[in-house]
Amino acid sequence: MMSELSEILSQFGVEAGALPHGNGHINRTYLVDSTPRVILQRINTAVFTRPEEVMENIMAVTSFIREKVAAAGEDPSRRTLTFLRAKDGKPYYKTVGGDYYRAYYFVEDTVSLERVDRLSDFAEAAHGFGDFQRMLADFPAQELYETIEKFHDTVNRYRQFADALKENRARRADTVRAEIDFALSHEKYASVITDAIADGSVPLRVTHNDTKLNNVLLDEATGKAICVIDLDTVMPGSMLYDFGDALRFGASTGAEDETDLDKIHFDLEKFEVFTKAFLEELGDSITEKERELLPMSVLIMTLECGIRFLADHLNGDVYFQIHRENHNLDRCRTQFKLVSEIEALLPRMAEIVAKY
Ligand code: ADP
Ligand code: GN1
Ligand code: MG
């Protein structure tokens, strides 16, 4: 394996060792011990079936951001990802076996957090993702490919869940009846955002779509959000996806895969801190309907993620990387626990939104 990686790295003109890095569920990520250090990633082509399009999107978005931050007098190499070119000039390398690899500079002196320990870090994450969306507000959205179709179309996610249930490929359905019942009894929420997009009250914007806390790098010294990463799903979407998904992950009191559900709660204080900072970034650009749906978006994104984990458990763990038995089921259970709490907290969340 190592020698294969060195062969791949040499295509990018890099000679150094590489070790697995990070906690992403999708791509395979390595930190390369070169000077300067580099991240090497194998794109998950089961998830991203058109990797060339993914890379075209990412190159367009990063160069757009690079110009903006340079014009503002900031250092683009810390504010967005910078990709290395392979020998043929492309920002990725396709192996003989058909794997796609890309390499970009590691952003030094930053941290990528797996959980919120300090409220100020979560506020920074909100500024980071909010600022990212603001910078892309005038990006020509029609130039972006849809890298995963209907990615946050929750109605479609329910369809995929129903297929997984029907096929029951891993023969696990009988062991997860309670989770299946929970999913089905909450299906009524699935169309709330898609309906609002369809009737025009929620506009499509260029969004990140995967605003998990560990996808924004914070400066180690200042704590400031400096670089949004994991750009594979940047495409037209709703700001509600970015808002809801960030809170799904960051406002939980426990890890996404915590097995002790007594440790999982939805933390209103974290919700408030994130909401305040995110709204400060997006300010006037947000519509009445978007504002109204902010609390509901957290419920929907959490529910959606839960049914995706459950569907993958039923399918035999073919989408999300797992590191132990029933890992996707454990992940599903934390999401559903959060959904129950969020459901009861919606009125209080609305009061908080009204403050900002
Ligand atoms: P995945 O799609 O699998 O989540 P990511 O692109 O998010 O992959 O990378 C996985 C992890 O690697 C990130 O959560 C982050 O901790 C780390 N990482 C990725 N790129 C960089 C970078 N340029 N600088 C520092 N850390 C990085
Ligand atoms: C995946 O790539 P990563 O680990 O940041 C997934 C997200 C889920 C998340 C759940 C492309 O995110 O949609 O919300 O896992 N990304 C993709 O942890 O499916
Ligand atoms: Mg990631």
Image: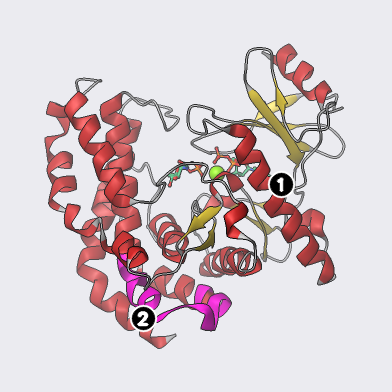
Percent coordinates x, y for residue 167 in the rendering: 21, 24
Q: Quadrant of residue 86?
A: top right
The span shown in magenta is 278-296
Percent coordinates x, y for residue 329 in the rendering: 28, 35
The residue at 47%/60% (across/down) is: 242
Q: Which residue is mark 1?
A: 59
Percent coordinates x, y for residue 337 in the rendering: 24, 52
Quadrant including the N terminus: top right
How packed mark 1 is, by other alpha carbons closer than 10 Å (few <14, some 14-19, many 20 or more), is: some
**Amino acid marked by disc 1:** Met
The residue at 70%/33% (across/down) is: 102
Locate residue 78 relative to residue 191 in the image: left or right. Answer: right
Which sits earlier in the primary sequence, circle 2 or circle 1? 1
Q: Main secondary structure of the magenta part?
A: helix
**Amino acid marked by disc 2:** Ile
The residue at 20%/24% (across/down) is: 168
> In this picture, is 3 found above or below 163?
above
Q: Which residue is mark 2?
A: 352
Q: Is residue 184 visible?
A: yes
Q: Is residue 110 visible?
A: no
Q: Quadrant of residue 241?
A: bottom left
